[in-house]
Image: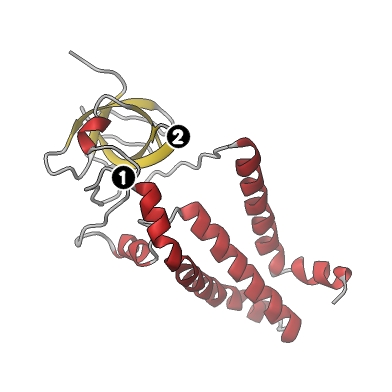
């Protein structure tokens, strides 16, 4: 296969989107490695999860939604989602590329095959990363005891208000940790806001945060 043929298949009507996403993912990781850039993608969702460890892992309770349970099945409570999605995207692109090379299906068939390719991609990614789970667990267990989070500042990764649960990122040294949090007084706290951890749930399921400490 010549380079021109490679480019033609990579940027066929079906593969163009996958190729562009893969290029963006590689660019992101290059910037991250070279400059330490952290591109922040906001999440605004109401989670029903359980944080019961000082490492910041998201532990899913038995009553969680099917979607959250599916994320746990993929080990996304252990593996960073950015790693997982990048590898899954690569497998999806690779599968779609070789389908185009060997079968050259009609456009609508090629589009339909992308979806099972993505499902296979995330399953292959789970299997590929499984041997690394102890490594990711070890990274996540560098934290301190839960009470040591009290008084620390962090940055919101989602918007919270009322009884809604959101995600907070805190740093212990150079190690980022993810905690599930709620607004102390129910006030609305926007994504990206710097907050202070002021209290914790008695069962350590989540922490309470506020924009300032009130006496």
Residue at 33% from the left image edge and 47% from the top image edge? 141
Relative to the observer, which residue lies in front, 24 or 148?
148
Task: Specify few, some or many for label 1: CA neighbours under 10 Å numbering under 14, 14-19, or 20 or more.
Answer: many
Residue 51: % across, % down: 25, 47
Tell me how far mark 1 sits from mark 2, CA to CA.
Answer: 13 Å
Task: Specify few, some or many for label 2: CA neighbours under 10 Å numbering under 14, 14-19, or 20 or more.
Answer: few
Return the residue found at the far bottom: 103
Residue 146: % across, % down: 22, 37
- Secondary structure of residue under mark 2: loop
Residue 187 visible in the picture: yes
Residue at 70% from the left image edge and 74% from the top image edge? 97
Return the residue found at the far top: 215
Q: Quadrant of residue 171?
A: top left
Residue at 25% from the left image edge and 51% from the top image edge? 48
Which label was assigned to residue 26?
A: none
- Name which of mark 1 and mark 2 comes first in the sequence: 1
Query: Would you say 48 lies left or right of 203 here?
Result: right
Picture layout, residue 28 above or below residue 9? above
Q: Quadrant of residue 190?
A: top left
Relative to the observer, which residue lies in front, 146 or 108?
146
Position of the C terminus, as image quadrant, is top left
Residue at 35% from the left image edge and 56% from the top image edge? 77
Q: Are marks 1 and 2 in contact (CB under 8 Å)?
A: no
Position of the N terminus, as image quadrant, is bottom right
Residue 58: % across, % down: 31, 51
Which label was assigned to residue 174?
A: 2
Residue placed under numbered mark 1 in the picture: 55
Q: Quadrant of residue 76?
A: bottom left
Relative to the observer, which residue lies in front, 174 or 24?
174
Query: Would you say 23 lies left or right of 178 here?
Result: right
- Secondary structure of residue under mark 1: loop
Residue 162 visible in the picture: no
């Amino acid at each position: 296969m010549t380079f021109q043929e490679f480019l033609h298949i990579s940027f066929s009507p079906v593969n163009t989107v996958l190729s562009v996403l893969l290029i963006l993912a590689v660019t992101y990781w290059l910037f991250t490695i070279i400059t330490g850039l952290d591109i922040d993608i906001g999440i605004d969702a109401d989670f029903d999860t359980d944080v019961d460890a000082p490492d910041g892992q998201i532990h899913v309770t038995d009553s969680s939604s099917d979607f959250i349970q599916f994320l746990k099945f993929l080990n996304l409570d252990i593996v960073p989602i950015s790693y997982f999605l990048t590898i899954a995207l690569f497998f999806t692109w690779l599968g779609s590329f070789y389908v185009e090379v060997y079968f050259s299906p009609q456009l609508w068939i090629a589009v339909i095959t992308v979806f099972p390719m993505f499902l296979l991609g995330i399953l292959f990614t789970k299997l590929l990363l499984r041997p690394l789970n102890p490594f990711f667990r070890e990274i996540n267990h560098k934290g301190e005891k839960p009470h040591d989070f009290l008084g620390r500042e962090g940055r919101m990764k989602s918007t919270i208000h009322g009884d809604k649960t959101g995600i907070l990122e805190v740093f212990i040294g150079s190690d980022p940790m993810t905690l599930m949090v709620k607004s102390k007084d129910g006030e609305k706290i926007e994504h990206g806001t710097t907050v202070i951890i002021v209290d914790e749930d008695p069962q350590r399921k989540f922490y309470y945060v506020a924009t300032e400490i009130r006496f």
